[in-house]
Image: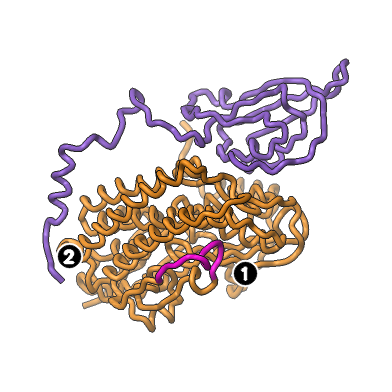
Amino acid sequence: MVRTIGSMFPEAFRHLWKKRATVLYPFEKLELTYRYRGKLEFFDERCKGCKVCEEDCPSFAMEIKDEGKEQDGKTKFRRIYHTDRCLFCGQCAESCMSESIILTKEFELAESDKEKFTIESTYSTEIIAKEREVKEDG
Amino acid sequence: MPKVTIPVGPQHPALKEPINFMVSVDGETIVDADMNLAYSHRGIEKLAESKTYLQNIYLVERICGICSHTHTTCFVQGVEELMGIEVPERGLYIRTLVAELERIHSHLLWTGVAGHEIGFDTLFMYTWRDRELALDLLEMITGNRVNYGINTIGGVRRNIKAGMKDQILKHIGKLEERVQYYTDMATTESTVLLRAEGVGHLPENEARKFCAVGPTARASNIPTDVRKEDPYAAYEELDFELITSDSCDILGRLIVRMQEMVESCKMARQLIENLPSGPIRAPMSREVPAGEVVSRYEAPRGECLYYVKSNGTFYPERLKVRASTYANWPAVVYSLKGYYIADIPLIIAAIDPCMSCTSRVAILDTKDGNERKVLDMDYLRTYGIKWYKEHGRGVRRR
C-alpha cells in the first residue's frame, strides 16, 4: 500500500475557482422540486365532508367539525388546520377523494404568535359518498 | 497502579447523542468498558399502538432521521405480509431505488463523520458536499431530502417519470466517480491510515459471538446481508456483490462502506435501466387481519427487525423495533478494550451509531423484591406535593 499525505490538496485547491455551493438566504433561495410538500391549501367548495383527512392525519393537525344542517340542506363544517402540528407528509391530500387539499411550496411558516399557527375556516357543503380512488402520482 | 474509571457521556463533546460509557483506564489505555443506553427513550412503540397502520408509517419514519426509509419499508413489508398484498413490481423497484440512494447518503455521511473524528475535516466537508447529489435525487423522487414519505401500504406514493431517469443516471455517474476517488484516497492517505488501521479490532469469532450486523460484521469477514440471505423488495433480480473485509478494524469498516456505495450505485443503475411499467401500488384496506409477522431489512447500518402483532382492528396490538445499532453495541464495548482514550470517539463512531434508534427498551428489574403498582393521577399529585414538602423546590420563585 502506497502511503501518501495531503492527497486531498489538489482537490481543495481546485475549489478555489469553483462556484459557491451555498446560497445567501433569505436574499437568495434554492429552487424547490415540484414534488415539494409545503403548507396546505384548501379548496372548501370541493370538500364533501368525509373527514378522511382528519382520520388519516398522523399528527392530528386537521380537525373537521360538523356544525349542523343549514336551511338549504347543506351541512356546515368548521375546519381547523394546525400548521405547528403538521408534518407535511401529504397523506391528507392523498386520501382526500374530492381533491380539495393541495400542498403548496410555502415553507417559511415561523411565527412568534402561537395563535397564528391555527387556521380556521367555515363552509357549507353537500355530503356525497364517493368510492375512494387510488391515486397514481403525487 | 490502581484502575481509574472515567465516565464518557451521557453529555460529552465527543458524542453527538446521549450515551454513557464507563471506561476503566490504566494510564492512557482502556482496560475495561461498560455502557448505559436509553437516555433518549421516546415511547414510540407504545405510541404506535394508538395510531392506525397508515399513521404509523409516518411515526416509524421518525425513529431515525438518516435511515427513515429503512423503518417505513420494514414496517410496511410486515403489514403487507399480514394483509396478503402483492406489491406491483414497479413499486418494489422504486422502493429499492430509494433504499439504495439512502444507503449512499448514509455511508457518505458516515465517512464524513469518521473523517471528523479522526481530525480530517477536509474529508468531512467534501463527502458531505457529494452527499448532496444523493439528497437531490431523493428530493426529486420523493419531495423531501429526509423523511421521504414515499412508502405506503401496498406500494409507493410517488412515481418515477420518464424525464427523471436521465437526471438520476447523470447523478449516479457523478457519485460513482466521487466514491471511487474517496476509496482510493482513504486507502492511501496517511492521516486516515494512522488513525484507523489496526484500531478497534473485532475478530470474526467475537463478532459472531456478539451478533454484530451490517458493515461492522462484514468488516470482520462475516458474509451477512439480508439482501442476499432473505431477499426482499427487488433485490432478488439485482446483480450485486456482498462486500466483506478480513482486516477486522476501523479501516475495514471504512473500506466495506466505500465499496458498498459502489455496489449501490451499480444497483441504482440497474433499477433505473430495468424499471418495469405498470402501477406503483396495490389497493389496500384499512383493516389488517389478525396475526403476527417479523420483517427484516438491511439498513445502511445492518439488519433492522420489526415485529408487528395485529388483532384484526385498525390499530396494531404490538410493534417491536430492533434497530441495527442496538445489535452492534456489545461489539463496540469489546473493541474499545486495549486502545487509547483518544480512540474512543472513533471506535464508537465506527459502527455508525444512532442512539435514539436504539433507545426503545425499558428494562424492568423484577428481582429486587419491591412492590409494583399502577399509579393514577391523584396518587401522583399527592406524592408530588409530599415530595416537594420534604425536599423543597430546586428553583424557587422570586
The answer to whether residue A45 is left or right of residue B265 is right
Protein chain holding label 1: B
Earlier sequence position, callout 2 versus callout 1: 2
Could you say which disc has been placed on residue B182 in the image? none
Classified by dominant secondary structure, the portion drawn in magenta counts as: loop
Badge 2: how crowded within 10 Å, few (<14), some, or many (20+)? some
- Foreground pick, B382 / B214: B214
Query: x, y (%) of residue B149?
Result: 55, 46
Count of marks, rendered view: 2
- Left or right, B56 with respect to B356, comes to right
Does the segment drawn in magenta span residue B234? yes
Q: Which residues are magenta?
A: B231-241
- Colour orange maps to chain: B
Q: Residue at x 29, y 54 (%)?
A: B112
Are labels 2 and 1 on one chain?
A: yes
> Residue B35 location in percent, x, y?
40, 67
Q: In the current view of this chain or complex, which residue is farthest to the bottom? A: B205
**Residue B232 on the magenta span:** yes
Give the CA separation, mark 2 to mark 1.
59 Å
Identify the residue under disc 2. B188
Report whether residue B185 is seen: yes
**Quarter of the figure with residue A69:** top right
**Which chain is purple in the rendering?**
A
Q: Secondary structure at mark 2?
A: helix
Name which quarter of the figure residue B25 lies in: bottom left
Say which amino acid is labelled 1: Asn
Q: Which residue is mark 1?
A: B370
